[in-house]
Image (cartoon, helix red, strand yellow):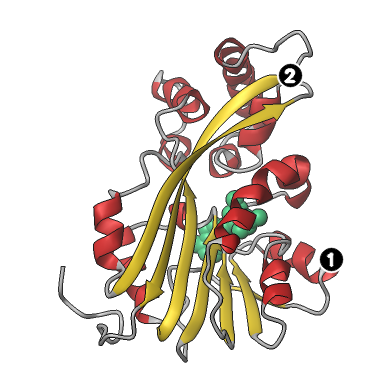
Amino acid sequence: MSWDPDRYLRFASHRTRPGIELLARIPDIDARRIVDLGCGTGDLTVLLTQRWPDAQVIGIDSSPDMVDRARSHHSSGTWSVEDISTWASDAPLDVIYSNAALHWIDDHRSLFRRLRSYVSDRGVFAAQMPDNWAEPTHRIPAEVLDSGGWPDAARSALLRDRLSTVDDYVRWLQPAAVDAWRTTYYHRLSGEDPVWTWVTGSILRPVLDRLTPAQRERFAGECRERYRVAYPPDHNSSVTLPFSRLFLVAHSTGRTKPSGPGYSST
Ligand SMILES: C[S@@+](CC[C@H](N)C(=O)[O-])C[C@H]1O[C@@H](n2cnc3c(N)ncnc32)[C@H](O)[C@@H]1O
């Protein structure tokens, strides 16, 4: 899947704020090994380095374009092109941090249990994922794609309903004290069709990759028109985009935890 760092960063302050708030909720621990999963352009990874200057901090992302951007803007960082679904840690990690990335990975049950198994005895797992799957941002492209006449590959590339329940996540992250919360941001966006610009920087990337230029133009036309109705511009030509996000911070208690990804408790 292709990512466009410049397009993603069009709304940089809106997109990084949840990541900063996630970071603020990580307790002050003595962290030596830290990984940022789905680090994107690395702008948040750098904040991890600033908070724990003596730690080894690695940013991992499957997009070479995003990692190139991280390397060129943050040359002192350590970056690696890897897929979270196959990535494995070779030693315990004190902080696993992931902002707006884990919803791209299938099978959260095995993913979260596997990631949890990499956290050190007193370490922290911290993740934020979009929790707005029923909002027009996501409903509109789904309605357009489901109306017929689009390639199956594009339809199935649209992420839908990605999250499990909070109780599931809490269970998969045991043993740990889990702080879970949901925040709705009301992003004030301006510019031409700003909601379309927002979604084409993230959730619609894999869909657009699977359309021909002519299909892309038709798809854009239909979605833009519906977004204008769902998010009408105000007297300042700005729109309000409500965007809910789920946060999970699991602080290990030091009790015995399952070892390795293959353990079998529920
Ligand atoms: C919405 S961006 C978030 C980037 C960064 N964490 C931030 O908050 O600015 C999602 C990132 O997840 C990465 N990603 C998606 N699926 C991935 C996977 N399977 N493995 C690694 N990275 C992945 C994308 O390449 C993208 O950079």
Quadrant occupied by the C terminus: bottom left
Left or right: 240 in relation to 124: right
| Residue 171 percent across, percent down from the top left | 24, 64
Q: Nearer the viewer, mark 2 or mark 1?
A: 2
Examine the rendered structure and indicate whether residue 164 appears above or below residue 183.
below
- Which corner quadrant of the image does residue 48 belong to? bottom right
Check residue 73 in the rendering and tell me which mark sits there, or answer none: 1
Left or right: 140 in relation to 36: left
Residue under the point 36% across and 74% down? 116
- Which corner quadrant of the image does residue 105 belong to? bottom left
- 239 and 28: which is toward the camera: 28
Check residue 238 in the rendering and tell me which mark sits there, or answer none: 2
Check residue 125 in the rendering and tell me which mark sits there, or answer none: none
As helix, strand or loop, the secondary structure at mark 2 comes to loop
Rendered-image quarter of ligand 1: bottom right
- Which corner quadrant of the image does residue 66 belong to? bottom right
